Image (tube, grey):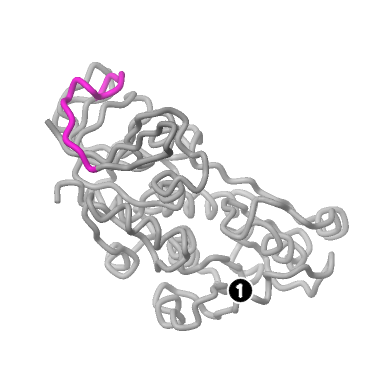
Amino acid sequence: MFSALLIDKDDSGQRVTLTDLDESALPDGDVTIDLAWSTLNYKDALALTGKSPVVRTFPLVPGIDLAGTVTHSDHPDWSAGEEVLLNGWGVGESHWGGLSQRARVKGDWLIALPKEFTVRQAMAIGTAGYTASLCVEALDSFGVRPADGEILVTGATGGVGSVAVALLAAAGFTVAAATGKASEADYLTGLGASAILDRAELADRGKPLQKERWAGVVDTAGSHTLVNAAAQTRYGGAVAACGLAHGMDLPGTVAPFILRGVTLLGIDSVMAPTPRRVRAWERLARDLDPTLLDTIATEISLGEAVAAADRLIDGAVRGRYVVDVNR
């Protein structure tokens, strides 16, 4: 038996319970894992609150991230006793996920825990930090360099934004952090931000082309925020777009793209191929100071995840929630 958060739905609506399950209830997969830690991401909060149709099948254990120790494997790449982690691949959406003490998944979805991190630290990073690393990797691969100018990070106090600020600063970039939480300025400068912007500057409809400010952008917001960030990006710069906290719409024009040669880089973390995932985690292992994770992460128990999901949806959270699934 093991404990898990279980989402179910009937004619009366969705309900979430913390329950005990038998291992026979686990879905198909070729690797079974004793989980130690998970996380709470924005997508998990949407699933737990039912505010968006994230969950594709019921009943389902949510949690798009998981980390722990392999207990049984029929996959050639993994053996009992190995520490592994997983981000995305539809886990927590259509396949049972990480807000549980046990999981059974496809071995092709796993990567080895980097030796630089404990399982708790890996989950303090989670999909949010891994997505941030994918964004930085995309800007780097595009050719954006510290000498080119400032990088803007929107939603900077969130999980993706916090890690993006830290990674960019570690890579030598000058980082401007946009946030609606002026009280978190010290937190952001502690991560490496050189300037703090009020997110309100980007929140409303702006001109198609604005003063050139940014060599690159990591955008977690979408909507007018993304449009304004692109309109302020320098000639030949790039915007890595990975989120929709402000909205899924894109109410702008093609002006930045055809008049300034700005490139919009779409970042997907869910189905990214394994080599790209490995490179992202290698950057995290190389450039992210593990001591910063104590600042970024707030620890909660499995039973506290539902209440925490409401706070996350309301934008009342700084950094990341890391979930101890065994308490």
Measuring 49% from the left and 32% from the top, which residue is drawn there?
Answer: 273
Provide residue 256's location: percent of width, then percent of height. Answer: 81, 59
Residue 22 part of the magenta-drawn span = yes
Does the rendering let one see residue 171?
no
Amino acid type, label 1: Arg
Measuring 48% from the left and 38% from the top, which residue is drawn there?
Answer: 270
Report the residue marked by disc 1.
Answer: 199
Does the rendering let one see residue 217?
yes
Give the residues in magenta. 18-31
In this rendering, the answer to whether 280 lies above or below 155 is above
Nearer to us in this view, 314 or 265: 314
Measuring 55% from the left and 80% from the top, which residue is drawn there?
Answer: 195
In this rendering, the answer to whether 203 lies above or below 247 is below
Q: Quadrant of residue 246?
A: bottom right
From the viewer's perspective, tell me whether residue 152 is left or right of residue 279. right
Q: Quadrant of residue 143?
A: bottom right
